[in-house]
């Protein structure tokens, strides 16, 4: 499973993408489980006011199923002027 990181999520993790080990990604069944795992691995992610997740280029709620072949994107809150 490939996880693409943007904005502050990229800064928190220290990379623009993550490759989840197959053994771990097979245990994560939903977007919510993935967010919980990432929050425990990178606690600073929990401090974001919001964190949208896209699965295969579509925004996904926490109950959306994921699998090892999905492309996941973490989309942090954005601001602009």
Image (cartoon, rainbow, N blue to C red):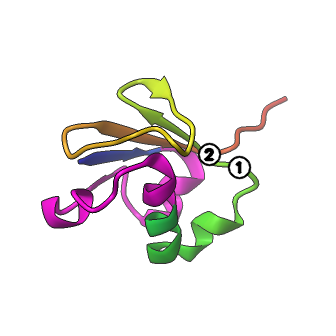
* Disc 1 packing (10 Å; few <14; some 14–19; many ≥20): few
* Picture coordinates of residue 13, whole percent (x, y): 44, 65
Q: Nearer the viewer, mark 2 or mark 1?
A: 1
Residue 26 in the figure: left or right of residue 77: left
Element on which disc 2 rests: loop
Magenta-colored stretch includes residue 10: yes
* Picture coordinates of residue 52, whole percent (x, y): 60, 41
Q: Nearer the viewer, residue 11 or 35?
A: 35
* Mark 2 touches mark 1? (CB < 8 Å): yes
Quarter containing the C terminus:
top right
- Lower position in the chain sequence, tag 2 or tag 1: 1
* Picture coordinates of residue 2, whole percent (x, y): 26, 46
Element on which disc 1 rests: loop
Residue 26 in the figure: left or right of residue 14: left
Specify the quadrant of the image occupied by residue 25.
Answer: bottom left
Q: Residue at x 42, y 49 (%)?
A: 30
Q: Is residue 71 above or below residue 33?
A: above
Specify the quadrant of the image occupied by residue 55.
Answer: top left
Residue farthest to the left, as pictured: 22
Q: Which residues are magenta?
A: 6-35
Magenta-colored stretch includes residue 48: no
Q: Residue at x 27, y 62 (%)?
A: 27
Q: CA distance from mark 2 to mark 1?
A: 6 Å
Q: Residue at x 23, y 66 (%)?
A: 24
* Picture coordinates of residue 7, whole percent (x, y): 56, 46
Residue 35 in the figure: left or right of residue 3: right
Identify residue for label 1.
Answer: 50
Identify residue for label 2.
Answer: 76
Q: Is residue 54 above or below residue 44?
A: above
């Amino acid at each position: 499973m490939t996880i693409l990181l943007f904005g502050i999520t990229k800064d928190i993790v220290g990379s623009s993408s993550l490759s989840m080990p197959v053994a771990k990604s097979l245990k994560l069944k939903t977007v919510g489980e993935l967010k919980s795992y990432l929050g425990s691995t990178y606690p600073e992610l929990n401090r974001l006011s919001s964190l949208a997740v896209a699965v295969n280029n579509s925004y996904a709620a926490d109950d959306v199923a994921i699998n090892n072949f999905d492309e996941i994107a973490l989309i942090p809150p954005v601001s602009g002027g």
